[in-house]
Amino acid sequence: MEHRPMKDVALLGSTGSIGTQTLDVVRENPDKFNLKVIAAGSSTDLIRKQITEFKPAIVIMANKDSAQLLAQEFPSIDVYSGKNSLKEVAGSCDIIVNAIVGFAGLPVTLSALNQGKILALANKESLIAAGPVVQKARRTPGAEIIPVDSEHSALHQCLRGYETSYDAPSSAVQKLILTASGGPFRGLSREELKSVTIKKALNHPTWDMGPKITIDSSTLMNKGLEVIEAHELFGVPFGQIEVIVHPQSIVHSMVEFADSSVIAQLSLPDMRLPIAYALNYPQRNEAKWGAINWSEISKLEFEKPDTENFPCLKLAYQAGEAGQTAPAWLSAANEVVVDAFLKKQINWIDIPHLISLALDKYDDLPARDEDDIYAADLQARLVTKQIMESK
Ligand code: NAD
Ligand code: MG
């Protein structure tokens, strides 16, 4: 058998939903992956267990106090804190898994690509917020994004063999068809949506995910963000990216080619499949996650998304088409509003309305470099908070 060297892996966001599932993949493949770096926000109990089990050389905590505690407890490990440490670690690893939630993942995405590394990208917010800047970083020799998001992993798999890039999308590709589960509120009327609770919004029918993306799924903003993510990853114009609701979450996305042939990727909903795909890329290795028992699948349904009651999808198309820092603005406004919902400061039904008001205040800010993105993000957060306070 061909000998392949171990890959050194940096896993940023190791205590979250994607982080812990990435560790399942690493745990099953001790001969393939060496977990060299882990990073998290502040959850020290879980990170302690991870340090003991995987013995990473470097640990990074966003929270300084957590970092200090861990440094005392594990003197043989290098423990750092802060944004700059997140930027520096990429250089010493082969694959960087960005599993941080939200805009906080931006330094990881940019530094991994600028250092010519393979970026296994779960953190869609960084790509959406910084599209034009990420595209420049992506041109660094050796740099490559392998999507972890299940729909984009599906598209990546369907597109293999067709050269698509941001600069030159293949003319063979006619349409990307992203599937959406529809979330927990699919089929509810506007009246019913007025009284939905946090508990219900956090109860996703097919996927078990972190709180922010679970709320995004309930509003269809997650699918909207994924439309922009698909545009950035594969260079396909927005008019050729379609969303279709598929409640079973088995067809993870599809590509329609110029001859009208459609190729889809199917598996049971299990994020460890796209995570393993990204870690193993360009190989495919034996794995059990998401295997389909065909005699148990009785139906695959498809229906149009309800953009009247779930307007976030339309807002995302608008921001995507506007380009520049409009997607950064949309994503920042969404983070602020979702955070307020999770803190019980606003109702679920207010989420799209507040984001729409925030987008109305967007003012064509350029996206030339990283500083522009940080400025737009900050501005959008201020504007959104002002809108919420004035309500
Ligand atoms: P989560 O809330 O479960 O985990 C987030 C992780 O990020 C935690 O480990 C947290 O400690 C860490 N973190 C937060 N702020 C940080 C900071 N400033 N510095 C370092 N670490 C920080 O979230 P999740 O559901 O795992 O989602 C992570 C990302 O993956 C999101 O962008 C989400 O959209 C994307 N994604 C998730 C899923 C899923 O199934 N969970 C599927 C597709 C895409
Ligand atoms: Mg997804």
Image: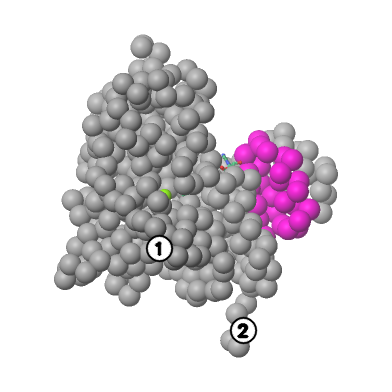
Residue 170 image point, x, y percent: 23, 68
Instruction: Based on the picture, tell me whether residue 96 belongs to the magenta stretch.
Output: no
Q: Residue at x 82, y 42 (%)?
A: 72
Quarter of the figure that contains the C terminus: top left
Kind of element beneath mark 2: loop
Q: Tag 1: Cα neighbours inside 10 Å, few (<14), some, or many (≥20)?
A: some
Kind of element beneath mark 1: strand
Query: As shown in the figure, which amino acid type bears the numbered disc 1?
Result: Leu
Q: Is residue 213 left or right of residue 87?
A: left
Q: Is residue 102 left or right of residue 357?
A: right
Q: Which residues are magenta?
A: 36-63
Residue annotated with mark 2: 3
- Please indicate, yes or no, whether residue 234 appears anywhere in the rendered image: yes
Quarter of the figure that contains the N terminus: bottom right
Quick check: marks 1 and 2 in contact, CB under 8 Å? no
Task: Residue 194: name its quadrant.
Answer: top left
Q: Is residue 98 left or right of residue 312?
A: right
Q: Nearer the viewer, residue 102 or 152?
A: 152
Can you say whether 278 is above or below 13 in the image? below
Residue 221 image point, x, y percent: 35, 38
Residue annotated with mark 1: 266
Can you say whether 155 is above or below 40 in the image? below
Q: Nearer the viewer, mark 1 or mark 2?
A: 1
Q: Is residue 52 left or right of residue 300?
A: right
Q: CA distance from mark 1 to mark 2?
A: 30 Å
**Sequence-wise first label, 1 or 2:** 2
Query: As shown in the figure, which amino acid type bears the numbered disc 2?
Result: His
Q: Residue at x 48, y 30 (%)?
A: 200
Q: Quadrant of ligand 1?
A: top right
Instruction: Based on the picture, tell me whether residue 50 belongs to the magenta stretch.
Output: yes
